[in-house]
Image (tube, rainbow, N blue to C red):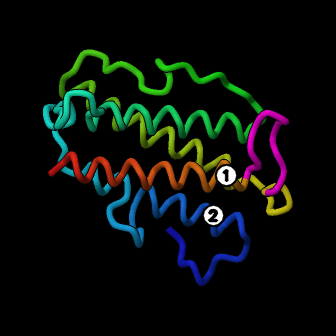
Amino acid sequence: MGDPVAVTSERDRIVNQLERAFEGEAWHGPSVLEALEGVSWKKALEKAIPSAHSIWELVLHITAWEDIVRRRLLGETPAVTDEQNFPAIPNPGEASWKEALGALRAGHVRLREVAERIRDEELDEKPTPKTSTRYILLHGIIQHDIYHAGQIAILKK
C-alpha cells in the first residue's frame, strides 16, 4: 500500500482506501483480510444467530460484489440474483474454505486492476446509464468491505 502523502490523483486516493479496507492499515479497525486471519473453515460455517449469515457466506458475498462492481466499472450491467448475492457454500471443508479465500483475494486483485486504470476525469461518469458513477461504485465497494469486515470481526468472537 502506498503512502497517502505520495498519492497524486483522486483515483490513487480511492485505490489506497480500497486497499486499506480490504488488506489493512484501515482507521476503522480490521480490514477484510485482517478480520479473516485465523478463521478456520469450521468457525467460518458457524451461525451465531440462525437467521444471520456465517463468515463463509459473507466471504462469498464480498467476493460476488467485488466482481459485480468490477464488471459495472467495465460497462456491464449484470443482474444480481439472490443466488449471486449470497452464493451457497460448496462442499464445506478445509479445501473449499481455502478456495473461497483464494477467490476473495483474486477477485479483489481484479477489481483493483480495473480501478487503477480509471482516469480522474472518468470518476464522475457512469459506465452505463444503469449504473452509478465510477466514484460512487468505488466508494460503495469500500464501504461494503468495511461493513462486512466489522460483521466478520464480531462473528469471529
Residue 91 in the image: state x and y as whole percent. 25, 15
Say which residue label 1 marks.
115
Give whichever of 24, 47 is nearer the camera: 47
Residue 14, numbered circle: 2
Q: Nearer the viewer, mark 1 or mark 2?
A: 2
Few, some or many residues within 10 Å of mark 1 (<14, 14–19, 20+):
many
Marks 1 and 2 close (CB-CB < 8 Å) = yes
Q: Quadrant of residue 26?
A: bottom left
Disc 2 element: helix
From the viewer's perspective, tell me whether residue 73 is left or right of residue 41. right
Give the residue drawn at x 49%, y 67%.
Answer: 1
Q: Position of residue 83 (x, y in %)?
A: 47, 18
Amino acid at circle 1: Ala
Specify the amino acid type for callout 2.
Answer: Ile
The image quadrant that residue 28 belongs to is bottom left
Q: Residues within 10 Å of mark 2 (few under 14, many from 20)?
A: some
Q: Which residues are magenta?
A: 124-134
Tell me the residue at 34%/37% (across/down). Answer: 101
Q: Nearer the viewer, residue 98 or 145?
A: 145
Q: How far is disc 1 from disc 2 in space, using C-alphas?
A: 9 Å
